[in-house]
Image (cartoon, rainbow, N blue to C red):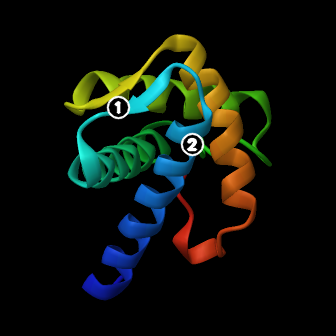
Amino acid sequence: MSIGKLIIKIIVAALAIAITAFFVPGMSNQGGVWSLVLAAIVIGLLDWIILKLTNIDASPFGRGIVGFIVAAVILYITGMIVDGFTVTLLGALIGALILGVVDVFIPEDKKVM
């Protein structure tokens, strides 16, 4: 993957996270654009690590309940890691659902999770 494609994927993921945080109670971003970018990077890294270790894709839709739960866990952990980005347990569950809906409209090569 080229640097340009990686940057576009991170920007698209940050936008998807911003949309999700706007609509989901229990998920908020007080850190501005940089915390959204950092959250997108952390989510991407956690998704990649989980996929490599367990072969479970953290896509909220199309992967069943396991993918949904993994996506919620990734969101919750990201909220603990990224300063300015907070996620409650309920926010992670609802956020995984919303990110799944947003992911449906994003081209395959630019997916968030």
Category of crowding for the residue at label 2, using alpha-carbon neighbours closer than 10 angstroms: few (below 14), some (14–19), many (at least 20) = many
Residue at 29 percent of width and 21 percent of height? 80
Q: Position of residue 44 (x, y in %)?
A: 39, 52
In the displayed structure, would residue 111 be above or below residue 29?
below
In-front residue for pair 33/61? 33
The image quadrant where one finds the N terminus is bottom left
Left or right side of 67 for 75: left
Disc 1 marks a residue whose amino acid type is Thr
Q: Which mark is residue 64?
A: none
Q: Residue furthest top?
A: 89
Residue at 27 percent of width and 54 percent of height? 33
Observer-side mark, 1 or 2, equals: 2
Q: Is residue 2 visible?
A: no
In the displayed structure, would residue 88 be above or below residue 55?
above
Measured in 3D between alpha carbons, the distance from the residue under mark 1 to the one under mark 2, in whole angstroms, is 14 Å
Residue holding disc 2: 20
Residue at 57 percent of width and 42 percent of height? 20
